[in-house]
Amino acid sequence: MSPAGATPAPALALADAIRSGERRAVEVVEASLAAIAERDGELHCFNLVLADQARARAAEVDRMVAAGEDPGPLAGVPVALKDNLCTRGIDTTCSSRILAGWRPPYDATVVTRLARAGAVVVGKTNMDEFAMGSSTETSATGPTRNPHDTSRVPGGSSGGSAAAVAAGFAPLALGSDTGGSIRQPAALCGVVGMKPTYGTVSRYGLVAFASSLDQIGPFATTVADAAGTFDVIGGHDPADSTSLDRPTPRVLSVLDEGIAGLTVGVVRELLDGADADVVARIRAAAEVCAAAGARVEEVSVPEVALGLSAYYLIAPAEASSNLARYDGVRYGLRVEAPDAASMNVATRTAGFGAEVKRRIMLGTYALSAGYYDAYYGQALRVRTRIIEGFERAYRTCDVLLGPTSPTTAFPLGERLDDPLAMYLSDVCTIPSNLAGHPAISVPFGTGGDGLPVGAQLLAPALGESVLFRAAAVLEAGAPPAGDPGAVDPGAGGAVTGEGAR
Amino acid sequence: MPGRYSISRDDVAHVAMLARLELSDAELDTYTDQLGAVLDHAADVAALDLAGVPPTSHALALANVLRPDEPRPCLDRAEVLASAPAVEDDRFRVPSIMGEAP
């Protein structure tokens, strides 16, 4: 299953070793559990560690190998799951008080597909409450810390999954990405994180935040492992009515095809507002693409500058509707009260944290009589404009390049009380969600503070093949660890990450 | 372009009621400030002339998805009810909805 050539794929190599009997899944899983026991008290990547279940599952994988059966391409590989992916009979909390102790009566489709591929789930990872946040600080179970610097955030909302892979707790993890919640924490933690084309990975069993934007995707230490995981979880699912009923690109087999002759567009508006050291790294990433034989040009997609405002109307509007289901009736928290209406209010008031309440109210307002056209209606028209802007860029470019995040990992607490500053963390990732396009963050050196920088590649809908090919090129050309990087004074872009407009 | 506090304290109290949330006076002040800042940022979108641009509610052209009308297994009732805050006679139990009968 490992690709030809020199592309490293530690998770897939592990699976190959287990399938061939060279290594035993129980030992691999035990090492993962030991690493978690050793350091997760400090990092808090996990809401729940499934030690007994993981050991039993690993023993089953070993039994299959011994019996001559093939457990699948991810045989015995430890995987961490974001805690908004439903696991039958196992707590799924979305890091919210309102779902504390909830045990879903079914598995998400991605969970079923991972199991069929032989993967071993080691735990459920911490996240911003209901995936609303960019730092994993809005979690009701407390923040996750960045393994590279524990005074910093891991990004979010899938911060637990990103940090778990960065810390070596598991070689693979799944997250969800509504406005950048896979790619931004991947960038801040120095791992690979990918958001697929909307509809290529089933959302069945993903607790809904903003249904027209949510997609599940992989975290891994290398592009090849992310590709192999995408191949496992992607594909049509009749249980998700928004699942694309057409062939999903297979990406692992094309990884080594390179990008010679393709055109890579560096998006000017994604560089605007990024820190100078981040911009310098992205310029260097463009040079790596050129050295690989691609034509590199600077492109302007001015519409993406409107993405942030449109997103923070559309996503809360959809969230206000999706989260209406938490009413204390069928599952989750109930705060008793004399009548049903006051029970609803008491339950929601006690069960939701501050950021979730903020988004629900913002969305309710944007959808309310008198404001619907001015805010929500306008945002939907901006969404059309953003899609048109990308279409224009893809007439000349095969793939687009920019930073994943305007800054490296920021200190815990820095943006928590300033929602707008927090929202600006997502400015580079949001446009792909609004357009439904695939995008990937690849580690590309460090910033001036020594913390990881992520280079983001974007492709048109169903352009996963070219996306992963370009990602493999960037990975191969990334600066070595410890490279200080040169801040290019002529790189352009503002000097702070806060002025992203 | 709307000025700061384009959303009023009364507006926030109203949307909280619509969203079935109860806010303290201090929370009302905080949320009025914070939602105002986000909406001010969105003023650039609200101010655009986009007449004639069709809205996109979804990135994909969605079509209704149907399946044959045939019985098939569904979620296990006992498993579902095990997650409920209160159950009576195999049903979800809730506090009174209509008040006492006259």
Image (cartoon, coloured by chain):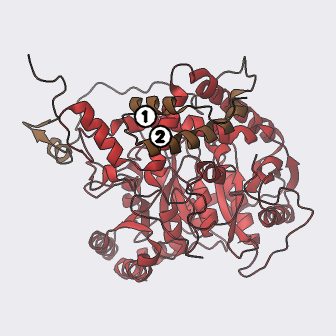
Indicate the amino acid at tag 1.
Ala
The numbered mark at residue B28 is 2
- For the point 64% across and 63% down, the residue is A187
Res. A267 visible in picture = yes
Q: Relative to A115, is A189 above or below?
A: below
The one nearer the camera, A309 or A49, is A309
Residue A258 percent across, percent down from the top left: 75, 61
Q: SS class of the residue under badge 1?
A: helix
Quarter of the image for residue A60 reads: bottom left
Q: Are marks 2 and 1 in contact (CB under 8 Å)?
A: yes
Chain letter, red: A
Badge 2 density bin: few <14, some 14–19, many ≥20, Cα 10 Å? some
Position of A340 compared to A140: left or right? left
Determine the colour of chain B.
brown
Residue A272 percent across, percent down from the top left: 80, 51
Question: What's the distance in space between the residues labelled 2 and 1, CA to CA?
Answer: 9 Å
- For the point 74% across and 41% down, the residue is A304
Q: SS class of the residue under badge 2?
A: helix
Q: Relative to A61, is A269 above or below?
A: above
The one nearer the camera, A7 or A150, is A150
Task: Give the label, 2 or 1, closer to the camera.
Answer: 2
The one nearer the camera, A413 or A432, is A413
Position of A266 compared to A256: left or right? right
Q: How many marks?
A: 2
Q: Which residue is mark 1?
A: B16
